[in-house]
Amino acid sequence: MIEIRSLTKAFKNQKVIDNLDLSIVEGKITIVMGPTGTGKSVLLKHVLGLLKPDSGEILVDGQDIVSMDEVQLTEVRKKYGVCFQDSALFDSMTVGENVGFPFTIHTDLTREQIAKEVGSLLKEVGLGGIEDKMPAQLSGGMRKRVGLARALALNPKVLLFDEPTTGLDPVMISAINALIKQVQGKTGSTSLVISHDIKGAFSLADYMALLFDGKIAFYGTPDDFRNTDDPLVRQFVEGMLTGPINPIQ
């Protein structure tokens, strides 16, 4: 579904992404993990077309988005549903208006039709009947689920998650991961998740990738990650202080 080839990006002579290759398998959940500051969010911004690489290709459904202009990118982004780390809800809008926003912008549905779609989406994420609440009235977990409902609005082929469980308690982390798994199973969408949540990744992912030093240092199934003797993987997964990752850099 998404093929990243030889991607390179530097900021002020600091190479953040270095000749990176990664395949995001269609209809599966791929989780990209890695130490803080290794370029995970930069990678996601390239997939969204918010950043242009210094070199390389990003093929989405066989089309290279790197060479596209903003009009062409807008069409590609209609295939995406995005859940941002902080949910990125509009504080001045109600929950219903937030979830209905993609319909308002991209469709000709009537207000009544949008309201029906919004109600259905909120029920899907376990939040039926909160359309009139404001984002400030919601807990962190509820905001995440509203963000997911909005991401699902236009039946996206690709779901992109940026740290979907950051700042949540362990029970809510499990709930959000279960919801992502449920949604992916129901919609058959292709999912790319940026995450630090090792435990959640093992239960959620079909494929996992470890980003380190600007490259994909290890890629495979959860079982591949569990069983490898690779010192970088072992240090990251087990949270050890000694190893290739220097925690005080």
Image: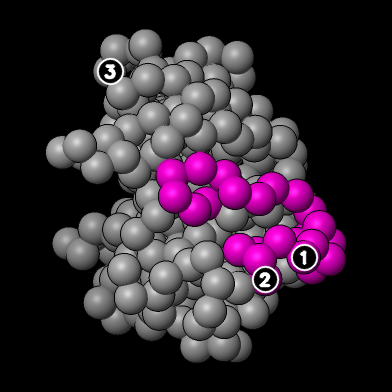
- Depth-wise, is mark 2 or mark 3 nearer the camera? 2
In what quadrant of the picture does the C terminus appear? bottom left
142 in relation to 225, above or below:
below
x 35%, y 59%: residue:
37
First in residue order: circle 2 vs circle 3 = 3
- Using the image, tell me which numbered label, if any, was put on residue 229: 1
In what quadrant of the picture does the N terminus appear? top right
Decide if residue 116 is in sight here.
no
x 24%, y 58%: residue:
90
Q: Which residue is mark 2?
A: 234
Instruction: Find numbered disc 1 in the image and state the secondary structure of the residue it sits on.
Output: loop
Instruction: Find numbered disc 2 in the image and state the secondary structure of the residue it sits on.
Output: helix
Q: Which residue is mark 3?
A: 70
First in residue order: circle 2 vs circle 1 = 1
x 72%, y 34%: residue:
26
Q: How many marks?
A: 3
Name the amino acid, label 3. Glu
- Depth-wise, is mark 1 or mark 3 nearer the camera? 1
State the image coordinates of residue 223 (x, y, percent, origin top left).
84, 62
43 in relation to 126, above or below:
above
Q: Nearer the viewer, residue 101 or 161?
A: 161
How many angstroms separate mark 2 from mark 3 (CA)? Answer: 41 Å
Decide if residue 62 is in sight here.
yes
Query: Does residue 188 appear left or right of residue 78 in this picture?
Result: right
State the image coordinates of residue 88 (x, y, percent, origin top left).
30, 58
Q: Which residues are magenta?
A: 211-234
State the image coordinates of residue 143 (x, y, percent, origin top left).
40, 70
Query: Does residue 200 appear left or right of residue 64 in this picture?
Result: right
Query: Does residue 175 appear left or right of residue 202 in this picture?
Result: left
Q: Nearer the viewer, residue 16 or 100?
A: 16
Q: Find the residue positioned furthest to the front.
A: 243
Is there a contact, CB below 8 Å, between mark 2 and mark 1? yes
